[in-house]
Image (spheres, rainbow, N blue to C red):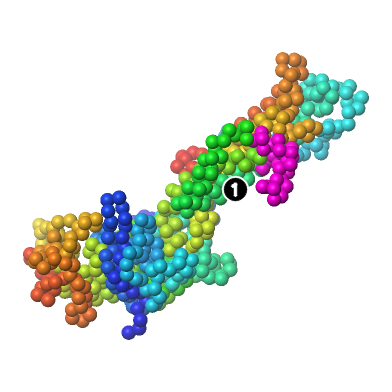
Amino acid sequence: MSRDLRMREAQSAEGLAPGSAALLLPEPSDVGVETGGRPIRSQWRFVLRRFLRHRVALIAALFLIGFAVFAVVWPHVSSNGVNPPITRALSAHAREGPSWSHPFGTDQLGRDQFARVLDATKKSLVIGFGAAALSTLVGVIVGGLAGYYRGWIDALLMRFTDLLLVLPTLAVLLIIATNPNPSFFGLFDLPPATEVGGMILVLAVLGWMPMARIVRGEVLSLREREYVDAARAAGASGPRIILRHLLPNAIGVIIVFATLEVGLAILEEATLSFLGAGIQLPDVSLGNMITTAEDTVGTHLAYLIYFPGLVLFLLVLTVNFIGDGLRDALDPKSIR
Amino acid sequence: MSDPVLELEELAVEFSVDDGVVHAVNGVSVHVDPGETLAIVGESGSGKTVAALAVMGLIPPPGRIVGGDVRLLGRALVGLREREYRKLRGADIAMIFQDPLSSLNPAFRVGDQIAEALTVHGALSKRAARQRATELLDLVGIPQPEVRARYFPHQLSGGMRQRAMIAMAIANSPKLLIADEPTTALDVTVQAQVLEVLRAAQREVDAALLLITHDLGIVAGTADRVAVMYAGRIVEDAGVDELFTTPRHPYTRALLASLPRVDAREGERLQVIPGVPPNPLALPDGCAFAPRCAFVVDACRDEVPALRAIEDGRLVRCVRVEELDGTPVGEDTPAVSWRA
């Protein structure tokens, strides 16, 4: 506010009749941001704007959305199924290279590789986002409790986290994923890893620890802020402070890390499928398609391994680019 | 006179640190009557904020209450279970912090924060709480309250933020308001406004106010009674007029004499209190002010003087109070009223 304006305000305040209601409380000499009646920009509006300016991330996001929409819509518009009945007509088109009618070619039985890759992509995306969401949930709860309460709760939760972190991930994942009848400590049955839901569980079991550590670190620093004291002085309980005051301020870090976990989960799923655990044929996944086509490298059928591989590569790349863009957009110190 | 809202009785708070034990609050007895404003003044480290946090039951570790009692409306609070204490905080006792920017959650709209203070304690619906939050913002003189309620803290000026904090503090009509240096972080031009709002808010909910400050100017304009703290003890407890016109404890006298004066002669130097505050890890055996006191005698160093009542209910912790007069200490300071 300019000095002149302030002085004018001060003068007009003096001009008020004594005893009028306005004198009951002093008129504020400064009010804060004047928006002139425009709606107030929330933090998220700024974040969105900064993200949209991050060209690589924006392209990656459009690409990923395109992937997802295409994977969902394609089976409804295409006559080529994932596992069509093997007929003579189908076999007549076996081992055909990429063409307009079969963009990714056909496999040894004449099935359209494009439809199969899209179906596998859909599963990869569901597993990737599902596992990341579940890992984030567990990680946020563990990290939030450990960081806020400290003391023995912190020690117990974090030592358990460390314990899981030092396990050889791939070996343990393989053991869990190959269990045909998984259950929750014998209490109730869980879906096996050959199903999408089961695969999400398997990946989340060993996927939440980095998130827990990050959230704990963030909460440890945020809990020393004065507004936490103020919340405590207003009578807020521990869980309420964690949920309403700490996590909303850590949301940027959580979102960015969760995004990167999506890419990691997609890769892990593909690895497990490639090694024979996880989604089993005739259901397709990017991993088991690559396994099936393993021996085509160097032959004219190599497109059978290149296309699933390329899609896997692009999926992980786009997800990571989106993570980068979100990190820049959510960073308040960012000058973009 | 009705029963006091708050009583501290020989309250003692210690912090065990690596180098020993810090006696932050060392037997503080003070009371606040209904509707009264008591200012606790003292320099940094005198224990005034720790005393306030002890009332809230929010002394940070490794600090702990080692003796004495805190009574709110006659109810003993020391040793109260956390769950019980939580019901009092924000309901019967509310606190206003020093820096309103860091005390408001940056991820929350101010209206929602005030509404939360209401829903933590009341059975108010979200909608009713929002409505009440807007009324409270209006009450503390924030223009266009329904618009400002949707602001984030960073969009408000310092004075507006502190008004919002005051609105939050009186949301549940507490019996006792504690304001810890409420204007220290503010621009000088808005300090007076915020104090006026604080007093209006106090009157609105008919609460007692415990004002923690080191600013004697604020004390003069706001408080009814003043307790002066030094090294974790109260050294003088008097009505605001009496304290400023006839300070009786040598520390109070030296403090008042050290204030810069408008009517000082040109070239006149500011009065200072010689020496430094005592090391809180090793307080002297006797009067903590003895090493810096201009009137020290041997008796001062033997044992801690008692806080004794002298005329008209004033309490002074000095063995020589009867023989010393009540002028600010300064070689040639004229004894005049300090009341603004």
Q: Residue furthest front?
A: A186
> Image height check: is B2 above or below B197?
below
Q: Is residue A197 in the magenta section?
A: yes
Tell me the quarter of the picture where residue A127 sits. top right
The relative height of residue B161 versus residue A24 in the rendered view (above or below) is: above
Viewer-side residue, A22 vs A219: A219
In the rendered image, the quadrant that contains the N terminus of chain A is bottom left
**The furthest residue to the bottom:** B1
Which chain hosts label 1? A
- Residue B103 x %, y %: 42, 58
Does residue B257 appear anywhere in the picture?
A: no
Q: How many marks?
A: 1
A109 lies left or right of B33? right
Q: Residue furthest left?
A: B331
Q: Quadrant of residue A279?
A: top right
Instruction: Left or right? Give the position of B24 relative to B247.
Output: right
At x 14% / y 56%, what residue is drawn? B275
| Callout 1 crowding tier (Cα within 10 Å): few <14, some 14–19, many ≥20 | some
What is the quadrant of residue A260 in the picture?
top right
Residue under the point 74% across and 23% down: A293
Residue nearest the observer in this picture, B161 or B34: B34
- Residue B276 visible in the shown view: yes
What amino acid is at disc 1?
A: Leu
Q: Please name the residue that numbered disc 1 is placed on.
A: A137
Image-based side of A227 in relation to A304, left or right: left
Give the magenta part as a residue range: A173-201
The residue under the point 47% across, 69% down is B84
Q: Is residue A275 left or right of residue A27?
A: right
Horizontal and vertical percent position of residue A320 = 58, 34
Residue A158 covered by magenta stretch = no
